[in-house]
Image (cartoon, rainbow, N blue to C red):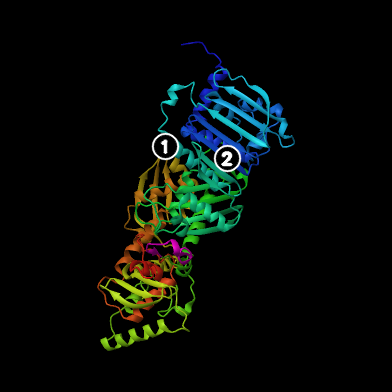
Amino acid sequence: MNRINLLSQRLANQIAAGEVVERPASVVKELLENSLDAGADRIEIDVEQGGVKLLRIRDNGSGIHKDDMALALSRHATSKIAELEDLENIASLGFRGEALASISSVSRLSMTSRFANGTAANAWKVAVEGQDMTAQLAPAAHPQGTTVEVRDLFFNTPARKKFLRSEKTEFSRIDEVLKRIALSRFDAQFTLSHNQRVIHKLLPALSEQEQQRRVALVCGPAFVENAVKVDIEGPGLRLWGWVSLPTFSRSQPDLQYFYVNGRIIRDKLVAHAVKQSYRDVLFHGRHPAYVLYLELAPSAVDVNVHPTKHEVRFRDSRLVHDFLFSSLSKALAKVTPAGQLESQHSTAADANTLYTGFGNDGLDNRYAFGGSQSALSLRDSITPFRSNYRNSAPDAERINQQLVAFARLNADDTEIPPLGYAIAQLHGIFILAQNKQGLIIVDMHAAHERITYERLKTACANEALKMQPLLVPLSIAVSAAEAVYAETQHDALLQFGLELERVSTEALIVRQIPSILRDANIEQLVRDVLSDVIEYGSSDRIQAHQDELLSTMACHGSVRANRQLTVPEMNALLRDMEATERSGQCNHGRPTWVYQSLDELDKLFLRGQ
């Protein structure tokens, strides 16, 4: 083996660049973060040939002092932290002081800046090339702020240049970086040009309407039209932003932006909490879309756990996980059909498709023809529905009910509920309803299934979790870490309905389980719960298994296809939908109702054209 030697500064910087500068988009990210940390609110990005030939970032920030220009290109040179205590309370996007040194080691870099207190003639320019890393300082003319030019990226490391993709692909990565950062700073203006052609010009977005417009530019107008605004505060935490309705889902998790104190991250704890909140309303295999911002004390999160700062570590991960889960679950459950229809009407000029609705609790009871039932026992949760939606009216009475419904719809002084009044049943499967704005189509089995399911969950929750001792305790072999955790967290696991006893270094005995899950795979359930609690600080396995059982019961207890309903029975179902949480989706994530406005119906028949 060779003797131990110190690496040269150039080689050390190039090795460090392998972590920081992966492609042109990585350079843009680091420089944009520097500009925002400098207080800039107007940033221009010029790109040529996908960023390989030229990257120019110009900002109007505080600038860099003349004496610090050359020092700024040195490794671990930063103005953002000075002591260890600063590292535990980071409020800036960058702090390591590696970006400029790493970028300059693999490119031809020049930086022109004027400090905030200087004049236009007091600007200075520093230039370096990757080979010698010797900084050359010269006077220049420049307004307040900084311009960084990065030319010929990877010109001195051809092996790494070979890993770059096509110009189009590399620019699309830069475009995505800009979108992510633009969503984190609504107060800043961003301009992106590629090969002397302006691609984006995002003006400052200060009002909520302007913020929604920027979100629509980045994520698409369909996302904003099908999103719920969230703004919830907890103990030392605040979550705000937009989450998509369950019926607006994606085949890939490609429309998910999550920010912690303005820093975009991809964290498995966050992803798990969001996925959990969509558990029984999202279609199988689909992914939600969201733009969310979590604000908490900088000391409560460690951002220094990943070279590119894409991951963070929360001091109290269980608190954050539970806060995200409960906040999003409540936000999704509180969306009313009335609110959803109002949102759709505001964007009706651009709409050409059917829209899906979403359920709610606590709607005005004057619309509840069938009445809303409070907490029921598990057995009583289904049987009243079978009598509510029975086929007992003779033909003459049905015709009379239909005429009464039409008269109510056409009365000017009648307040029509969001889902309107039923006018017909189609093929024994769908309910056609009319409101003031258009046509509502309801899948009666899917809607009734959700209503029954929510009532079963309420009844089960009010009866509290019942535990059942095992006649023959079950012995399970586990890892030493799982055994220690089960022993130390005995009381916490008991809240999930599991009584576990450690009998050896790597063995547990299950003595009690939730009675409703007596037919489940107990061993697999215990392993999954332990794994979740160790990883995320909590588990929803017990609740998920319980909900799955209740969902099956609700499915078998709901009205079936080809079941003829009278007009009052159909109206009772519509009123129950308006008073039930998550009634916009069935238990399997399918939409329960769709809406088409009169304007959309007119377009189908070319009326007014």
* Residue highlighted by disc 2: 44
Q: What's the magenta region? A: 343-356
Is residue 376 visible from the viewing direction of this image? no
**Residue 349 among those drawn in magenta:** yes
Task: Please indicate whether residue 256 sits to the left or right of residue 38 in the image.
Answer: left
Is residue 227 visible from the viewing direction of this image? yes
Where residue 101 sits, quadrant-wise, is top right
Task: Please indicate whether residue 41 sits to the left or right of residue 460 in the image.
Answer: right
Q: Position of residue 15 (x, y in %)?
A: 51, 24
Mark sitting earlier along the chain (1/2): 2
Going by the numbered disc 2, the residue's amino acid type is Glu
User: Which residue is at 35% across, 47% downward?
Assistant: 475
* Residue highlighted by disc 1: 168
Task: Please indicate whether residue 95 sits to the left or right of residue 28 in the image.
Answer: right
The CA span between labels 1 and 2 is 20 Å
Q: Is residue 587 above or below residue 476?
A: below
User: Which residue is at 50% across, 26% downward?
Assistant: 152
Task: Please indicate whether residue 108 sits to the left or right of residue 250 in the image.
Answer: right
